[in-house]
Image (cartoon, helix red, strand yellow):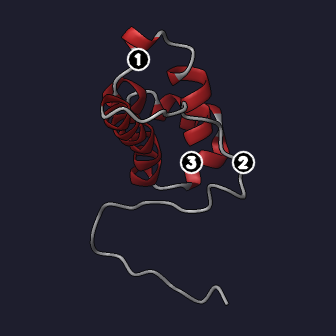
Amino acid sequence: MYNHALTQEYKPAPDYNKPSYTTIQNKLPEWKRKWTEWSSVYSKCLQMAVRRIKNSETVLDSLEERGFDVGKLKWKAPREYRSICYNQSGFDVDSNTG
């Protein structure tokens, strides 16, 4: 989801007209219908993947304002992006990954 949102929606847009978090989030139901393997993932997790793009953009902008030389957001290989965020309570994580 992160890579798709980044490369298909976020990067192609000009710097002055990047899509908002809400704009990208509103496309999630359509994407879940198009790619059925995403339908097994909780919506909150997909929303948080999209939110990571906007949070990372904010951090890069603040670093750049303070004079740091920053790069751009980039596509992440599956081995580099192996976590999910779930910002809702009422669940337990089974930590038997060995």
In the image, residue 13 sits, relative to residue 58, either above or below, namely above
Q: Which of 63 and 81 is in front in this view?
A: 63
Q: Residue visible at 55% across and 38% down?
A: 32
Q: Mark 1 points at which residue?
A: 18
Image spot of residue 46 (x, y percent)? 47, 47
Is residue 70 rendered to the left or right of residue 26?
A: right
Tell me the distance, in whole angstroms, between the alpha carbons under discs 1 and 3: 26 Å
Q: Nearer the viewer, residue 64 or 21?
A: 64
Q: Quadrant for the C terminus, please.
A: bottom right
Query: For numbered disc 2, what is the local secondary structure?
Result: loop
Tell me the distance, in whole angstroms, between the alpha carbons under discs 1 and 2: 23 Å
Q: Quadrant for the N terminus, please.
A: top right
User: Mark 1 and 2 residues: CB-CB less than 8 Å, in contact?
Assistant: no
Query: For numbered disc 3, what is the local secondary structure?
Result: helix
User: Mark 3 and 2 residues: CB-CB less than 8 Å, in contact?
Assistant: no
Q: Hey, what amino acid is under mark 2?
A: Ala
Image spot of residue 92 (x, y percent)? 39, 81
Q: Which of 61 and 28 is in front in this view?
A: 61
Of marks 3 and 2, which one's residue comes earlier in the chain?
Answer: 3
Image spot of residue 20 (x, y percent)? 34, 24
> In which quarter of the view is residue 26 placed?
top left
Query: For numbered disc 1, what is the local secondary structure?
Result: loop
In this orientation, does residue 1 appear? no
Q: Which mark is residue 77?
A: 2
Q: Residue visible at 67% across and 56% down?
A: 80
Of marks 1 and 3, which one's residue comes earlier in the chain?
Answer: 1
Q: Residue visible at 61% across and 33% down?
A: 4
Q: Residue 4 carries which label?
A: none
Task: Between label 1 and label 3, give the one nearer the viewer.
Answer: 1
Q: Hey, what amino acid is under mark 3?
A: Ser
Q: Name the residue under label 3.
A: 39
> In which quarter of the view is residue 74 placed?
top right
